[in-house]
Amino acid sequence: MGCNFTPSCAGSQLEMWQPATFAPDIIDRELSWAAGLGMNVVRVYLHNLLFDQDQDGFLARIDQVLGLAEAYGIRMLPVLFDGVWHPRPRLGVQPEPRPRVHNSIWVQAPGSSVLHDRTQWPDLRPYVEAVVTRFAQDPRVVAWDLFNEPDQVDALTIAGDSRAAKAEAATELVACVFDWVRAIDPAQPLTVGIWEYGPDHQPAANALNEMILARSDILSFHCYEPRAQLNA
């Protein structure tokens, strides 16, 4: 039992991990609260730009948070990429959150400019390889979530983008990420969550879901419906 975890001092993956806003004391305190509620796993988002900014420091901070979680009997489910929310991530000082707007400064990973430019995809591989290799045999990592909702409709769109183009690019990139991580052969299982369903409550029939179901070691899914639909 667990949750998506971002400390209360961070409005995005970048604010959680960048050196200027990394807050291990707050993370430690809030992980203790999670453990007090009976949680034993947290799903934590990473970002490729953090690796590009400070490779050794970023890996060290991940290791530090794994240690903080382990002290409370909590394991981590790292998320390598994310297809949701702001499509133009940038390092440095982040915008102020917009009041009453859900995830108002959360960012996609990679950004839209990279997702739609296949010539830049090889630049993502060192990030994947370094992070997964570093923790490939680490029992504090329960599994690898390779990509959160890769073809999600953006809360903030970019002129000229289309849902079809994003779904096509995301499906191809997820397949590449599966290939990169399989080559490392980590001890932990791999997964990408299903988030789209048909009227029969079964995964929507599309190329992305077909590939996810075929290539994931464990099946994970996101349900935003009441309990009755979840149980269905």
Image (cartoon, rainbow, N blue to C red):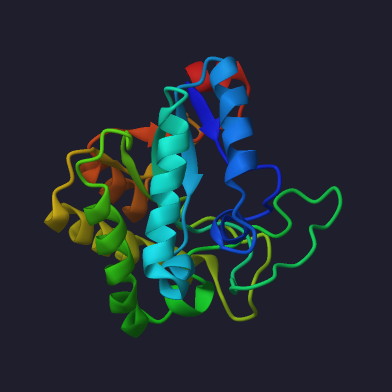
Residue 224 appears anywhere in the view: no
The image shows residue 184 at horizontal and vertical percentages of 15, 55
**Nearest to the observer: residue 131 or residue 158:** 131
**Nearest to the observer: residue 178 or residue 50:** 50
Relative to residue 206, is residue 112 depicted above or below?
A: below
Q: Is residue 175 left or right of residue 167?
A: left
Residue at image point 19% right, 41% down: 137
**Nearest to the observer: residue 202 or residue 12:** 12
Quarter of the view holding residue 105: bottom right
The image shows residue 191 at horizontal and vertical percentages of 31, 42
Residue that extends furthest to the right in the rendered view of this protein:
99
Residue at image point 86% right, 52% down: 99
Q: Is residue 222 left or right of residue 187?
A: right
> In this figure, what is the number of numbered marks?
0
Residue 48 appears anywhere in the view: yes
The image shows residue 119 at horizontal and vertical percentages of 32, 84
The image shows residue 103 at horizontal and vertical percentages of 70, 51
Q: Is residue 192 left or right of residue 6?
A: left
**Nearest to the observer: residue 87 or residue 65:** 65
Residue at image point 13% right, 49% down: 185
Q: Is residue 135 left or right of residue 86?
A: left
Quarter of the view holding residue 8: top right
Residue that extends furthest to the bottom in the rendered view of this protein:
119
